[in-house]
Amino acid sequence: MAQTSPKPTPQERSEHGRVAALARHRPDSPQLTQARRDLAGTQLERYIKRVVDAAPPLTPAQRDRLALLLTGGGAWHLGELAAAIATREIEGGGDKLGKKLMRTALIDPTENVLAQAEWAKL
């Protein structure tokens, strides 16, 4: 059974509206790319908070590894994280949220993100 996505926050609705308006009126503008990144960041923030709130407490080493992922340390970046979460969501039956996160990952994809998107049939 597919999981339902939580209701968007007012900030997400506002950012989504900005993306829609820019896509309609200025599809080639750099502001559209930035607006999509802002929306993706807000959606990821809400998702990560939900997952962390539901998880048992993390060890200091786990927190350090996650912080490294989120700050762009090593070979990871935000797109890699979004693709990894999307894959888990899709495997768990959350197709709608998984596909949304995968589209976010495809804004600036790595080879790994492209492979995961191909697996997800996006």
Image (cartoon, grey):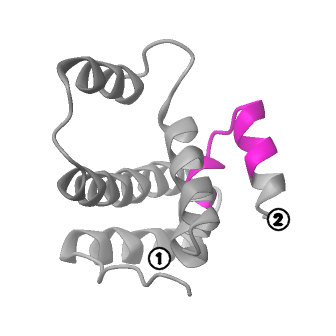
Assign a secondary structure to mark 1.
Answer: helix
Identify the residue position indicated by label 1 in the image: 21
Q: Quadrant of residue 102?
A: bottom right
Q: Amino acid at mark 1?
A: Ala
Assign a secondary structure to mark 2.
Answer: loop
Residue 67's tag is none
Residue 121's tag is 2
Q: Residue at x 65, y 56 (%)?
A: 28
Q: Quadrant of residue 73?
A: top left
Gap in Å between the C-alphas at discs 2 and 1?
Answer: 28 Å
**Can residue 80 be seen from the camera position used here?**
yes
Q: Is residue 49 magenta?
A: no
Question: Is 27 left or right of 3, judged from the image as shown?
Answer: right
User: Where 4 sits versus 28, above or below?
Assistant: below
Q: Amino acid at mark 2?
A: Lys
For the C terminus, which image quadrant? Answer: bottom right
Q: Residue 24's x, y, as percent?
A: 58, 77
Per the rendered image, the range of residues in magenta is 103-116
**Can residue 24 be seen from the camera position used here?**
no
Q: Quadrant of residue 87?
A: bottom right
Question: Is 19 left or right of 53, judged from the image as shown?
Answer: right
Please identify, in this view, whether the residue under mark 2 or under mark 1 is nearer the observer: 2
Q: How many marks?
A: 2
Q: Residue at x 45, y 49 (%)?
A: 37
Q: Residue at x 23, y 59 (%)?
A: 54
- Few, some or many residues within 10 Å of mark 2 (<14, 14–19, 20+): few
Considering the whole magenta stretch, tell me its main secondary structure: helix
The disc, 2 or 1, on the residue closer to the chain's N-terminal end is 1
